[in-house]
Amino acid sequence: MAEHIVSAYDAELAALRNRVVEMGGIAEKMLDDATRALVRRDAELAQSVINADVRLDNLQREIEENAILTIAKRQPMAVDLREIISAIRVAGDVERIGDLAKNIAKRAVAISGQMQPTRIVVGVEHMSDLVQEQLKDVLDGFTQQNVNVAIDVWKRDGEIDALYTSLFRELLTYMMEDPRNIGFCTHMLFCAKNIERIGDHTTNIAETIYYLVTGNPLVSERPKNDDTSFARVGEG
């Protein structure tokens, strides 16, 4: 009987992990597709990203419900409890990443018929490539429970912030040079801020991995290099 209970408990924990991994895969694809839709002015691809968000939301609810049920039934302690709490945290961050990718896709639909200065689009695409790499690494780190990977991702957050600050200033310059660029550049500012916020969520996940493995919070101050005043743009 005891072996059966342990086996069922292990299966519940594995199911939580698998659902988080599934969410991560969906979020990675959403960000990649949203970026490609933005670069290619592909409204159809952008719409597929918007539609994919429903699945991500449903998975997060499922993870939260199952996690709460497992805690109520099993009353886990120590590392088992941390694993369940970490699954809830990571699912929340991944769901938010999906929301931000959806926001980028909506912007891609809005500007799909407009002329786009290539240099600006390339800058946003490069920033997205770096964040996608962070996202992949941190999700792999979660699956492997690898603290070294988590710390590496955590340290790279400042690089994304610095790139966002540079892109922010470049977009402002384009708007000042020619008022006809204002509409397009405003959309791109929102896209860039959404990407930067996705980077912040990958850092959240890195901190959760550290907590999961060590049992302690990562208390050092994050490496931030965003000195723009556009602080909350892109959220919602």
Image (cartoon, helix red, strand yellow):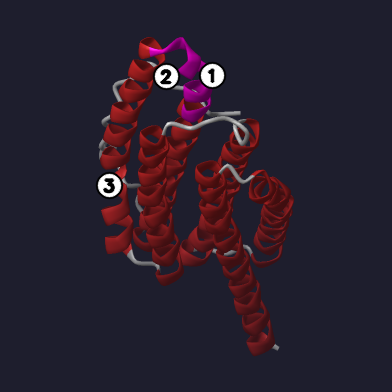
Q: Earlier in the sequence, mark 2 or mark 1?
A: 1
Residues at discs 3 and 2 in contact (Cβ within 8 Å): no
Instruction: Find disc 3 in the rendering and name its residue.
Output: 156
Relative to 40, say whether 170 is above or below: above
x, y percent for residue 156: 27, 47
Relative to 29, say whether 103 is above or below: above
Q: Earlier in the sequence, mark 1 or mark 3?
A: 3
Residue 182 magenta-drawn? yes
Q: Is residue 211 visible?
A: no
Segment tinted magenta in the rendering: 178-188
Q: Mark 2 is on which residue type?
A: Phe
In the image: residue 62, left or right of residue 187 = right
Instruction: Find disc 1 in the rendering and name its residue.
Output: 183
Q: Tag 2, which secondary structure?
A: loop
x, y percent for residue 20: 58, 62
Relative to 24, say whether 174 is above or below: above
Q: Report the Cα–Cα distance between label 2 and label 1.
A: 17 Å
Q: Answer with the quarter of the image where residue 72 lies.
A: bottom right
x, y percent for residue 70: 68, 64
Label 2, residues with CA under 10 Å away: few <14, some 14-19, many ≥20: few
